[in-house]
Image: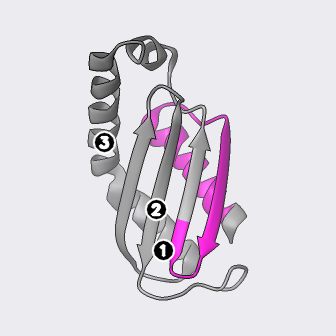
Amino acid sequence: MENSIRNAIIKFEQEFMGRGPDEVKAFVVRDLVVVRLKGVLTPAERQLAKTADGVEMVKRLRQALIAQGRDKLCEQVSAITGARILTVFTDIDAQLGEKVFVFTMDREIQPGSR
């Protein structure tokens, strides 16, 4: 299940964000799905992230893009886990080029089952 979530996130990032991450790890922890992505920034975003204003620009842009693709992403994760997603939290560290997703589910999930 964790590998399927990982692959869905990679595909989402490639298709919706325009660039896939260098590394993705997904974890199912009780009623949470936690995904950590490394190497998510484009070369332009890395340049912007060299200043405080640029960091804020990158964060705002990424948040806006996730808001637009949220439903599609939730559908994919829900289909894999068999659970309903209550909410999604996400943040990006524009200086490190790392992003996290935390999906809260309506029930505990057993990894490897559906």
Residue matched to label 2: 102
Q: Gap between marks 2 and 1, in whole Å? A: 13 Å
Q: Gap between marks 2 and 3, in whole Å? A: 14 Å
> Of the residues shown, which amino acid type is indicated by label 3?
Gln
Magenta stretch in the rendered image: 4-33
Q: Which sits earlier in the primary sequence, circle 2 or circle 3?
A: 3
Q: Can you tell which mark lies on residue 63?
A: 3
Residue at image point 34% right, 56% down: 70
- Helix, strand or loop under label 2: strand
Q: Quadrant of residue 4?
A: bottom right
Residue count near mark 3 (Cα–Cα under 10 Å), binned few <14, some 14–19, many ≥20: some
User: Residue 58 location, x and y as percent?
Assistant: 34, 27
- Note whether 40 is above or below 83 in the view shown: above
Residue 95 magenta-highlighted: no
Q: Can you tell which mark lies on residue 51?
A: none
> Of the residues shown, which amino acid type is indicated by label 2?
Val
User: Residue 79 location, x and y as percent?
Assistant: 52, 74
- Note whether 48 is above or below 71 in the view shown: above
Q: Nearer the viewer, mark 3 or mark 1?
A: 3
Residue matched to label 1: 78
Residue at image point 26% right, 34% down: 60
Horizontal arrangement in the rendering, residue 93 relative to residue 21 (left or right): left
Horizontal arrangement in the rendering, residue 11 relative to residue 107 (left or right): right
Q: Looking at this view, is 80 or 44 the one in front?
A: 44
Q: Which sits earlier in the primary sequence, circle 3 or circle 1?
A: 3
Residue at image point 68% right, 41% down: 23
Q: Gap between marks 3 and 1, in whole Å? A: 21 Å
Q: How is the image coloured?
A: one colour
